[in-house]
Amino acid sequence: MRLKSEIWVSAYLRRCAVEGAFAVLRRRGAAEAGAIFVLVDRLDGTARLFGPAPQSLADEDAGVRLFAPVPLKSGPTPAAAEERLRREIDFDSDLWIVDVEDREGRHFLDLARE
């Protein structure tokens, strides 16, 4: 069983703060199981977007949320990430968005390995 989205996001924000990265909840989604997207801005004109890993890569029994990099059409820029997030919101209005600012580009996420 997986943690509720609101609990996971709260813990993630604390983790970022402890590690010295600035993180803020930009959009609150469905408390129980809303999809979570994390936008990491390196503050140098580049950004990366992470979203839920495909279900085929997730182990539901482990209860761990896995993330995967989200491809951006026009390169790794904040504008490209914002465009992708707008499309995701049109598809699923219950999603969560967390913004992280870290010059090192740290994300503190469990990434899916293909």
Image (cartoon, rainbow, N blue to C red):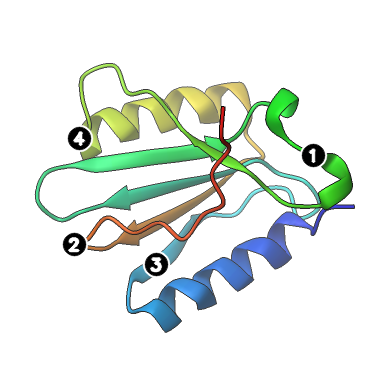
Disc 2 vs disc 4: which is toward the camera? Answer: 2
Q: Disc 1 on helix, strand or loop?
A: loop
Disc 1 vs disc 4: which is toward the camera? Answer: 1
The residues bearing labels 2 and 3 have C-alpha atoms spaced at a distance of: 12 Å
Instruction: State the residue position of label 2.
Output: 103
Q: Residue at x 46, y 61 (%)?
A: 108
Amino acid carrying label 1: it is: Asp
The residues bearing labels 1 and 3 have C-alpha atoms spaced at a distance of: 27 Å
Instruction: State the residue position of label 4.
Output: 77
User: Decide: marks 2, 1 in contact (CB < 8 A)?
Assistant: no
Residue 65 in percent (x, y) is at 68, 48
Residue 45 in percent (x, y) is at 11, 44
In the rendering, which numbered label is found on residue 78?
A: none
Above or below, comparing residue 25 to residue 22 in the picture: above
**In the rendered view, does 97 fall on the left or right side of 93?**
left
The residues bearing labels 4 and 3 have C-alpha atoms spaced at a distance of: 18 Å
Above or below, comparing residue 106 to residue 74 in the picture: below
